[in-house]
Image (tube, coloured by chain):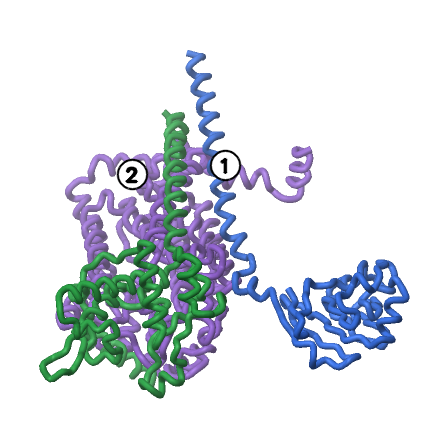
Amino acid sequence: MASTLLAWINRRFPFTSFVRNELTDYPVPRNLSFWWNFGFLAGFVLLLQIVSGVFLAMHYKPDVNLAFDSVQHIMREVEYGWLIRYLHSTGASAFFAVIYLHMIRTLYYGSYRAPRELMWWSGQVLLLLIMATAFMGYLLPWGQMSYWGAQVITSLFGATPMIGEELVLWLRGDYAVGDATLNRFFALHYLVPFVLCVMVLIHLVALHHVKSSNPSGIDLAAKDNIPFHPYFTIKDLFGMVVFAVMFFAVVFFAPETFIEEANNVPADPLQTPPHIVPEWYFLPFYAILRAIPDTLGGAAAMTVSVLIFAAMPLLDRSSLPGGARYRPVYRAMFYLFVMDVLVLGYLGTQAPEAWVVVVGRVATIIYFSIFLLLPWVSKIEERWLRRRGLPTALQATMASERRQKASGV
Amino acid sequence: MRSLRVLSGVLLATTMMPVVMAAVLADVEIPSDEASLQRGAQLATSVCLGCHGFKYLRFGNLQALGFSDEQFDSLRAGQDLDAALDSYTPADVARDLYGVVPPDLSLMAKAREGGPHHVYTLLTSYYTDESGVTDNHLLPGVRMPDVLGYSSAATPGERTELERQALDVVAFLSWAADPKVEQRERLGYFVLGYLVLFAALLYVLKRRIWARLG
Amino acid sequence: MADTDEADAGRRDFLTTTTTIIGAAGAAAACWPFVVSMNPTPGVRAQGAASLPLDGIPPGAIRTVAWRGKPVFVFHRVPEQIAKADSSQGGKDPQPDAERVQDAAWLVVVGLCTHLGCVPNKTADGWLCPCHGSVYDNSGRILSGPAPRNLDIPPYTISADGTLMIG
């Protein structure tokens, strides 16, 4: 019976072959470390956010007079409403944590390099969509931090030459962040995740075309690949549950970690809270914004600081395979970059006193220099490495790559 | 250019604002036992409600604090179980009297940096100087009067008693801001226990499956 | 050798089955909070009662009150209407009028057609549902049309001072 049905379907839709080619027998390099778990985790968090978000939307009211009350209604009256809200608010932070770790892996192992540029770029679009969704979602509880965060960020668009003022008015639909703003942010906050899903699909189609990168930095011969099922189904599942332990520890025992005190005060357009800080995942970019004394320059620098990741496949001109593993200078720059981002993130939490501004400027210069010097550094590093003699492991890797190319695998 | 001025104003404000340092807040353990919560609820309904409201709490919610029937009846003073804990001073009257509407207390325990410690410190920071003016160390010029009478406490014993009252109030405020905390943590232990067990099983299974590769 | 392999395979199967069952149970349990979050909240459940003073309703007049979000018709019947209602058993869902009222002067029925829930309009002899033409008499009994049963009677009491309490 089941086999007849399956045969009927398979004549009309490639069900069995799709499952075999893309899920069960899909070849994956056997040497992947736990660093390759984060894509799967991002998918899990996306699902969690969509499900919890849809259920929150059943009780939430996007109206300046009702929004704050409706969140408290969810927290106090709706059965398990507190759980669904804490899943969603903690999930937003978890999403960024997972995505940033995913990007760190990509940068360290050079996974953005040919032929995976489109994966990297579709990932960059995903990052921008997630940032936009998070920013709009943060307005919805209509607390003081929601309101003033949206007020400040929409004001940034006022720095656009010529049309700035009109642009801000258009974005808000009001002279200040108001009912119109809240309504459109809710509409878009509900919509964009589905656009995100389409982008995830594109990301996955590209992945299944070029296959996963791996720590060695070159594509493996067929004999070193293993089927996704059961090896990576079980590995990804295990990673997901380990992640869930940490995630639910926050949800159940420290759920207010990611909700600022000021956001438990209803929005008041007449009074700014004493200490405005963006969510942790925007802090490094916020620090770059504040490091530039000019509003337009600051806004431009902040935008570029996010977009510049997309240039990585063009900036890295080394012809040596892989990322940081066999390239000591690249590795040093990678660690410098990570530390610089952490410093910027810390500065983002501080009131901009004189020393914060100075350190912020230095860190901003370092941030951009790392990207902009990479074309020369990667070339010089390659020449230096070749003159010094490539490490044996790298030579073996490159030889095996040549053999594969020659045999046409 | 108006929005730009708002923006620069906000960026500037973050530099000028004195940040309340956690260090000045009293480092006390906030009780969560039933007796403290009950005493806190009694103080809240008899004193705090004079000016403040708890608009997200209903009288019926207070039953969760384990009052006896007689205690609960005297506490709610004939109010409907579904009635919110509104202030005895309506908002418009309060605005006429004080110039501002005293803030709602439902979420007060997590609406200030330091949370309940902020409120405890505020209640126990009133003092009277030589000229007889009463003020507050934590928030100088605060409009709220010294409701507990801390500034006029004459003996250390009296002060200790008022500090206990402040703790009871703060315990109640913490509960009011997060009434699901008990249910949440109980479920939390259960969920984490399950996940750790499941992770252990998956780990063993993963080891077995990967062992096939040799 | 073969023995240990088989034992190993058996253990693996047991482990796989256990893990799968525990995982599936966890996934099913995770759905529960989402399902019950759609239940009516305490505030909604508290709307279960409505009251109406009857002294302001003249004979022959009808008042509609909202009870649990539904209209309830409170109909002050005149003696002729009572007599007519009393004289028949209604239509396809026969029931004596006396069983449908506590006080013959007051008919209290849920004003939703038992067919698909539209609000019937008052006519001289009863009600007519505008959606699919169900006809009810002055006792709220179905006479003709697609509706399967008489208009529902909500739980209610009429106090000594003439106040109707529904719910």
Is residue A29 visible to us here? no
Pick the residue in front: A12 or A285: A285
Q: Nearer the viewer, mark 2 or mark 1?
A: 1
How far apart are the alpha carbons under marks 2 and 1?
Answer: 30 Å
Image chain in purple: A
What hue represents chain C?
blue
Looking at the image, which residue sits at the far left?
B130
| Residue drawn at 37 percent across, 63 percent down | B176
Are there few (<14), some (14-19), or many (20+) residues within 10 Å of tag 1?
some
Looking at the image, which residue sits at the far front?
C160
Q: Chain of mark 2?
A: A
Numbered disc 1: secondary structure: helix
Quadrant location of residue C124? bottom right
Q: Are marks 2 and 1 in contact (CB under 8 Å)?
A: no
Q: Chain of mark 1?
A: A
What hue represents chain B?
green
Q: Do the dots labelled 2 and 1 sit on one chain?
A: yes
Q: Is residue C102 above or below residue A321?
A: below
The answer to whether B179 appears left or right of C71 in the picture is left
Q: Residue C163: which disc?
A: none
Residue A276 image offset from top left, x and y in percent: 28, 71
* Type of amino acid at the residue the image marks with label 1: Thr
* Type of amino acid at the residue the image marks with label 2: Met
The answer to whether B207 appears left or right of B132 in the picture is right
The answer to whether B3 appears left or right of C76 in the picture is left
Q: Which residue is mark 1?
A: A24
Q: Which residue is mark 2?
A: A398
Residue B199 image offset from top left, x and y in percent: 38, 37
| Residue drawn at 49 percent across, 44 percent down | C29
Is residue A386 visible to us here? yes
